[in-house]
């Protein structure tokens, strides 16, 4: 069904234990069917990735079916753009639903018929109270609710009003259809919840055919039942809603019917995963869009350079449990580094260039040095990098007055130019402000390839790019979008936005092999981190790279200490 988790057997979590027990007990004839049911009112984020891996992974491992179903019951917030982005992101992550792509709107007639059946049974009524009145009369956790003055309407009267609601006779917000359960129920969700509301909005699939729409809780359980879902897996925020899920299906007599199970949603440090807050970031211009590489959206992670394998690995490592917890974002970055370390080709790039002149190197000579593409992959082979008299090095790789234990270039100090030669600094030039504009050195011809024939060793190795052969690029250095671990803890989470979450560097100097980079190509810029050619802005002659991750692995250090 899917290749979401690339392992023959995934770890047994409590959801999988339930599935296995049901199969052994012969429930549902041994059949397993799950679903991933996003609302098309935003882009998928890393929390949805956890649900995708769980639902599609279960279906695959137990020879079942997992469908992609859009719960499109709120047309005022839904767009085709979101539908298309969800499909693209889920498919990128590895989900394969085959022909099992559905919409709640596919079932609007059947859901409406279920509502009429409840009315006929005396289990639903049309309420004329406003939304505010209904909220006020619902009661509290310690006090029961108050019955609506319209609660005792006859089934005939309710059926007539409900049909007139569908016909568009009433104004939006003037009436709702409510389940008739118990206004004194301990679970507030069961205090006559709304099943349908009037919403005169154009629907992206059904157009203007409907002016009443089912509430999510009503449409969701019925969609599950109609499709034949056996295990309806959702996050803990829906735990209280399970009683209503069961009430609807049992009252309408669905047998067999799906069962709902809840697991803890993903909470991640240094970010927000609330769709409402993500929409704010986009609409208020704090980011460039849903696919901004600083966003925790799947499209943002993809554009930043994350791989689906790394995201799936992360979802497997954090596991599936009932208890809420917050995962350190360092674990996600660790998974990315581990994956890219194996697959990313190595290249040399100088982000903040400083000119280095090799004084004793022949003026017109150019040498080619063979450099490994990836020492972690013996099949990756080598590429050649040109070497000449004038080079670019990182500005941070030179100090006029070096601090203790500084092993890079400084007056009189020798370093290795990676894969090329040993060089010794002989001097430098600076402008009137004191900023160094050029460094001079001599090279030792006997150290070709970066190794000394006389056995002497140097402690410092730096990267370089031939000035005559360099290609220029813009490089975007991304950092966390927020400055604190839990930005949602404060009333206004935006007060914790990181003003330094993006640094754009122009005029970066790259080795010529990077001139062939195409959107989405991933590399390790030696000594600097992992970088990806931007999917939107990178093109031949105008290279743009996003920093995917630094080389420093915080999580590995945390795990080692633990």
Image: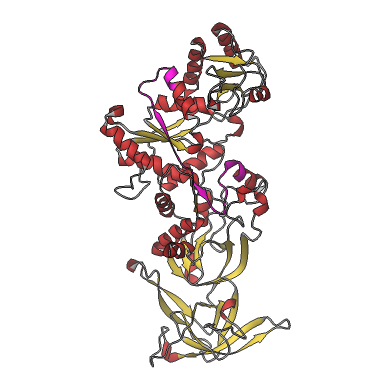
Colouring convention used in this rendered image of the protein: secondary structure
Q: Nearer the viewer, residue 539 or 553?
A: 553
Is 119 situated above or below 505? Answer: above
Give the quadrant of residue 561: bottom left
Instruction: Judge whether residue 392 can be spotted in this image.
Output: yes
Position of the N terminus by quadrant:
top left
Position of the C terminus by quadrant:
bottom left
Residue 251 colored in magenta in the image: yes
- Residue reaching furthest right? 432
Residue at the spot x=54%, y=19% of the render?
Answer: 182
Residue 448 place in picture, x, y as percent: 42, 86
Is 430 situated above or below 79? Answer: below
Residue 440 colored in magenta in the image: no
Residue 330 place in picture, x, y as percent: 49, 58
Q: Nearer the viewer, residue 392 or 549?
A: 549
Residue 560 place in picture, x, y as percent: 42, 65
Residue 407 place in picture, x, y as percent: 52, 83
Residue at the spot x=62%, y=63% of the render?
Answer: 503
Is 440 situated above or below 551? Answer: below
Bounds of the magenta span? Answer: 249-277
190 left or right of 377?
right
Instruction: Judge whether residue 95 can be spotted in this image.
Output: no
Residue at the spot x=40%, y=86% of the render?
Answer: 451
């Amino acid at each position: 069904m899917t290749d979401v988790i690339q392992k023959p057997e995934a770890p047994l979590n409590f959801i999988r234990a339930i599935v296995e027990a049901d199969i052994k007990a012969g429930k549902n004839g041994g059949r397993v069917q799950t679903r991933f049911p996003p609302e098309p009112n935003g882009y998928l984020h890393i929390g949805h990735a956890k649900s995708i891996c769980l639902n599609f992974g279960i279906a695959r491992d137990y020879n079942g079916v997992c469908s992609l179903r859009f719960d499109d019951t709120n047309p005022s917030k839904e767009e085709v753009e979101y539908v298309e982005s969800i499909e693209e992101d889920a498919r990128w992550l590895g989900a394969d639903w085959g022909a099992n792509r559905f919409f709640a709107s596919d079932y609007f007639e059947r859901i409406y018929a279920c509502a009429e059946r409840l009315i006929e049974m005396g289990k639903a009524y049309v309420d004329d109270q406003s939304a505010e009145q209904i909220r006020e009369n619902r009661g509290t956790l310690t006090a029961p609710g108050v019955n609506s003055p319209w609660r005792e309407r006859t089934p005939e009267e309710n059926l007539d009003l409900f049909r007139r609601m569908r016909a568009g006779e009433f104004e939006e917000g003037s009436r709702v259809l409510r389940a008739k359960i118990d206004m004194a129920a301990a679970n507030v969700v069961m205090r006559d919840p709304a099943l349908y509301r009037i919403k005169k909005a154009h629907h992206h699939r059904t157009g203007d055919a409907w002016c009443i729409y089912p509430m999510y809780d009503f449409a969701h359980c019925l969609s599950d039942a109609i499709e034949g879902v056996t295990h309806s897996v959702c996050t803990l925020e829906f735990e209280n809603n399970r009683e209503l899920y069961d009430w609807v299906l049992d009252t309408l007599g669905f047998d067999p019917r799906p069962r709902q199970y809840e697991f803890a949603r993903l909470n991640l440090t240094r970010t927000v995963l609330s769709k409402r807050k993500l929409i704010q970031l986009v609409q208020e211009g704090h980011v460039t869009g849903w696919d901004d590489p600083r966003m925790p959206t799947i499209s943002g992670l993809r554009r930043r350079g994350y791989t689906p394998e790394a995201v799936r690995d992360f979802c497997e490592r954090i596991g599936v449990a009932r208890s809420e917890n917050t995962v350190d974002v360092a674990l996600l970055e660790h998974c990315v580094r581990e994956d890219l370390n194996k697959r990313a080709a190595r290249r040399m790039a100088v982000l903040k260039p400083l000119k280095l002149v090799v004084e004793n190197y022949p003026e017109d000579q150019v040498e080619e040095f063979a450099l490994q593409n990836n020492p972690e992959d013996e099949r990756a082979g080598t590429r050649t990098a040109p070497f000449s008299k004038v080079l670019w090095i990182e500005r941070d790789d030179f100090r006029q007055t070096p601090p203790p234990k500084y092993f890079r270039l400084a007056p009189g100090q020798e370093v290795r130019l990676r894969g090329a030669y040993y060089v010794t600094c002989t001097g430098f030039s600076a402008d009137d402000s004191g900023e160094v504009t050029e460094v001079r050195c001599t090279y030792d011809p006997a150290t070709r390839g970066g190794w000394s024939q006389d056995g002497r060793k140097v402690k410092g190795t730096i990267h370089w790019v031939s000035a005559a052969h360099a290609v220029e690029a813009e490089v975007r250095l991304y950092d966390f979008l927020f400055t604190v671990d839990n930005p949602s803890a404060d009333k206004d989470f935006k007060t914790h936005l990181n003003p330094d979450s993006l640094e754009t560097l122009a005029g970066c100097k790259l080795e010529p092999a990077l001139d062939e980079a195409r959107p989405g190509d991933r590399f390790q810029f030696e000594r600097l981190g992992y970088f990806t050619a931007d999917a939107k802005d990178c093109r031949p002659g105008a290279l743009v790279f996003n920093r995917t991750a630094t080389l420093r692995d915080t999580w590995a250090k945390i795990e080692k200490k633990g």
